[in-house]
Amino acid sequence: MINSLYIKNLAIIDELEVHFENGLNIITGETGSGKSILVNAIAYLLGGRFSKDHMRTDSQKTIIEGNFQTGNCNCTIRRVISANGNSRIFVDDEPIKLNELPQITNKFIDMHGQHDHQQLLLPSQHLSYVDQFGDYDHILEDVLSQYSALKTCKSELLALKKIQTALDEKKELFTFQLEELDKYELEADVDSKLSSEYERLTRASEIIQHLENIDFSLDKSESSIVSQVSGLKSSIAKISHVSDELESIENRLESTMLELSDLAQEVKSIQSNVSVNPNRLVEVEEKLSHIEMLKRKFGGSILNVIDYRDKLVITLLEEQKSNKRIPELEMQCEKLLTQLNSTSTKLSNAREETAVKLSNIITGHVREMDMPSTQFNIKVWPSDKMTESGNDECEFFIQTNLGEESRPLAKIVSGGEISRIMLAIKLTLQKSDKVDTLIFDEIDSGISGATAERVGDKINALGDTHQIICISHLSQIAGKGKTHFKVEKNEGSGRTQASIKKLNMADRVNEIASLISGHEITETSLQQAAYLLEGSYG
């Protein structure tokens, strides 16, 4: 419930505070006095979109604060709207985002006004009333879960089929390209290795000739370098004992001779591995040509070629996987659809049973509100389209006069009738309402007399289980209130401002009398007002 409401700088409200009570709280006042501004303030506090037109003239900011209680939970919500339209929200002085506010406040208050009349006339909203009354939340949850699973499965299947279609169009090309790429083993430096080998093969005769010359000079001729160094070493050996310097020269010549011998052996080894090989030259030339072609086609470097080949391998593997996965998903989707259809059938049956019960209860309520021949009928039928809430459509039908056919609610009812039907629905759903407070903004529109008296009784009955805040212009309803507030509009210092006052019993008699007879309160209207209040409290 809402314990208190504080408003500053909203429309014609300069500053006011009101403390509501349990049961039925009545708010009355002249047209334009500011009654609906109170409702707007609560709507803004619950996260509603703020209208800049409601910013009080010459004000820098609007402040709305409410204290709410549900069960053992008590919290204070404050909304501060600046002149530029920016909002700041605080819950128990802790800032939160505006879009987070409804998650907190939806358990506090259910607001009902002319907009709800319009909602009641929309067939798209009718099924939600049936579901709220029904005792099958577990089936609704199952349908939602199964629908989500089927939707996910279908999305994955569709995505895979799109990929498969794209791959099918290019599979032949990709396979051909992979064959091209796999013709020779590719590695990071294959092109440089082949280029080196190609140069060796094309210059094989020249290399052999030079190696032979080197080998001859090093080791084979009578005056070879190795033999000359050997002779030098022998000569120095004869005198090396004379000094350390000469011994050092001998050692260095020994090392040189060994190094030259190793060098001669290495030249012979290389020489033995070099040969003129026309067949190998053709093979290497072909490989180089192929690799250069691949580089031109697939990225300009051997690394890019290898990367493209790896991607082709992955793509073709994915194609194989999707070929296998698609039939699996098709079977899974079929299974999920069968399961969803079965659960939706259970939901449809539960809704049809609930619709009959709800129709009878609402019929009973509206007949008690001066619509004695009315028959309310809720029709539920299968839809061609499956949704997350099943595949049912629903519409409210009503027969207002005996012997006439039932027709869609939107085509039959008057303003007063729709008010009574909405109230009947609220009465019927009150046990399943998850909120403590109901706000009715002129729900009595279009009714009067004995009908208003019965509507007042119904609203008062709601006050036994809920906190009700009801804006009314009818004495029959205002007289039912446990608590009565009057909103007035005053002028002073060149400004208009609204105020609210909790009425005592004497004030209530005068206010209800004014609702009966207008500005000129008569003795008769005072007596009638006292009678109405006595009936409520007697």
Image: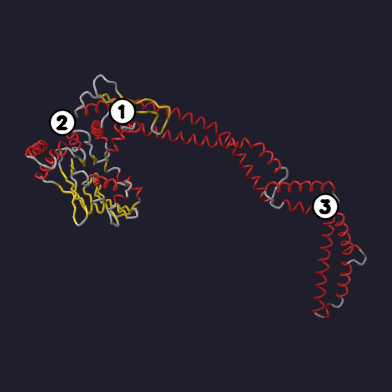
Q: Where is residue 60 drawn, in percent x and y?
A: 30, 57
Q: Would you name the residue on which mark 2 appears?
A: 450
Question: Label 3: few (<14), some or many (≥20) within 10 Å?
Answer: many
Q: Residue at x 63, y 36 (%)?
A: 169
Within the image, what quadrant is residue 349 found in?
A: top left
Is 127 left, or right, of 449 in this rendering?
right
In this view, the mark in front (3 or 2): 2
Q: Does 65 sit above or below residue 28?
A: below
Q: Nearer the viewer, residue 448 or 439?
A: 448
Q: CA distance from mark 1 to mark 3?
A: 98 Å
Total of numbered circles in the picture? 3
Mark 2 vs mark 1, CA separation in Å:
25 Å
Q: CA distance from mark 3 to mark 2?
A: 116 Å
Can residue 467 be seen here? The reply is no
Judging by the rendered image, the residue that carries numbered circle 3 is 201
- At mark 2, the secondary structure is helix
Mark nearer the N terminus (2 vs 1): 1
Q: Quadrant of residue 196?
A: bottom right
* Residue 264 visible to an observer of this rendering: yes
Which residue is tagged 1? Answer: 411
Q: Is residue 223 above or below residue 172?
A: below
- Could you say which quadrant of the image residue 461 lies in? top left
Return the residue found at the far top.
403
